Amino acid sequence: MYISKLILSSHPTTCPLDPIPTQLLQAISSSVIHSLTHIINCINSGTFPSAFKQARVSPLLKKPSLNPALVENYRPVSLLPFIAKTLERAVFNQLSMFLVQNNLLESNQSGFKSGHSTETALLSVTEALRLARTASKSSVLILLDLSAAFDTVNHQILLSTLRKMGISGTALLWFKSYLSDRSFMVSWRGEVSKSQKLATGVPQGSVLGPLLFSIYMTSLGSVIQKHGFSYHCYADDTQLYFSFQPDDPTVVARISACLSDISSWMNDHHLQLNLTKTELLVVPANPSFHHNFSIQLGSSIITPSRTARNLGVVMDHQLSFTENIATTTRSCRFALYNIRKIRPFLSEQATQLLVQALVLSRLDYCNALLVGLPACTIKPLQLIQNAAAKVVFNEPKTAHVTPLLIRLHWLPVAARIKFKELMLPYKTTTGTAPTYLSSLVQSYAPSRSLRSASEMTPCVAIPKSFKITLTDLFLDCAQLVE
């Protein structure tokens, strides 16, 4: 029963190495369940089948505008057999349960965790920077960049880390078998290269790879905390930040010492810190302060920038997010321009799906960071949504947009932000959000006894200076769409 659920719940991706199409395998899974169960049970023998250790790599051009003659413009997409990923999923479930039960997962790692996202990671860091500014402190945010991080993981160090976590015996032997003797072939224009061995790294395109990489990075946190820095990770993207008094003369030395130790840790773990892409953002205590310093690390010099792209969001040194809104507006306008050109050939339903996928998804991405911004700042996003609604119904630009939004059941941008502001604290109070968001939510404590005292009515504290009950948020959202 468990194996059938694994097979049927998996996305039916087919790899050239699969003997039959995945959809066909799922359709006949009940007839071959005994054979599939025998394959999955190889976990008990401490071995991973050799037939599943080969990957087919297909290079894809990162952007259509890039030069196809340059190898660095391609992104390698690794394809693995469907049964291999199903086997990995069974191990992933057991390993995740073991790590959660024994509290071994890094709490400041938001990658590849249920209920965690780039938005929750950015919200945690951004709120810390805002609170520091409220306390008249400046802050430094450092965005680390790693070169080919997943491909350079050392197997012996990874196995040693697993052993320290309490994984031993047959389980450890299975992971050793899973990592060893792997190979890949490159498929290009109908031709396939010779098989090449892989001596390092976690398998790309695998189910277990991201979790194993997170385990590999667990000891980095102690190196960062030793210097008094806070940090947050999302996969191989690491954000370092700390706050200081504006006249603190030790800031440069502290940053240099921390980055030096991080670089040494990276070298010891066979990872490469890309200093040319490492970004430094200084958030002053108030707009009148200007911190002008640079960090020397080896032969590289890191200088502060006014904006930095962090997990897909453009952050600026004033935390106003105006540049991010401008960037989002430009990308949405370009998408709408292309959709409008093919609108005569699309049905209304197809257009709506296309707009929701290419435009609304961008408007909603990490919009919790926009809480508290003035209406004039987010107005460009609302204009984009208005234009999107008119494209769906093929209406002229002068058409009244409110009836269109009601027909589409689209909340206005301001209401979408408030709805996100509502959902995150609700998930926090119910235990389905990351634990690091708990400090951003304060329970509602009335000054006098109320009839609703027996009910949970938490206050939203994102940011903490903005408090509003959940009931008020629902009413506000309802009024915005009426």
Image: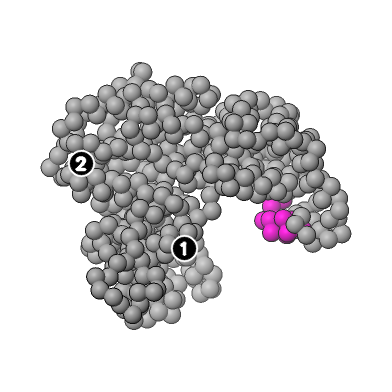
Residue in the image at 84% along x and 55% along y: 33
Query: As rendered, which of 119 and 170 lies closer to the eye?
Result: 170
Queried whether the magenta region covers residue 158, the answer comes back as no
Element class at badge 2: loop
Q: Are marks 1 and 2 in contact (CB under 8 Å)?
A: no
Task: Report which quarter residue 12 is drawn in.
Answer: bottom right
Q: Position of residue 73 (x, y in %)?
A: 51, 36
Query: Which residue has dot 2 on it?
Result: 137
Q: Position of residue 1 (x, y in %)?
A: 78, 60
- Seen in the picture, residue 288 relative to 257 is either above or below; the reply is below
10 Å neighbourhood of mark 1: few (<14), some, or many (≥20)?
few
Query: As rendered, which of 390 and 342 lies closer to the eye?
Result: 390
Queried whether the magenta region covers residue 13, the answer comes back as yes
Q: Which mark is residue 143?
A: none
10 Å neighbourhood of mark 2: few (<14), some, or many (≥20)?
many
Residue in the image at 49% along x and 62% along y: 357
Query: Visible in this render: residue 149?
Result: yes
Q: Amino acid at mark 1?
A: Thr
Query: As rendered, which of 343 and 446 lies closer to the eye?
Result: 446
Q: Magenta residues?
A: 4-16
- Circle nearer the N terminus (1, 2): 2
What's the distance in space between the residues labelled 1 and 2, CA to CA? 33 Å
Q: Can you tell which of label 1 and label 2 is closer to the viewer?
A: 1
Q: Position of residue 462 (x, y in %)?
A: 31, 58
Q: Position of residue 155 (x, y in %)?
A: 63, 27
Residue in the image at 35% along x and 18% along y: 299
Query: As rendered, which of 218 and 86 lies closer to the eye?
Result: 218
Q: Amino acid at mark 2?
A: Lys
Left or right? Give the position of 383 relative to 263.
left
Query: Which residue has dot 1 on it?
Result: 430
Residue in the image at 87% along x and 59% along y: 31
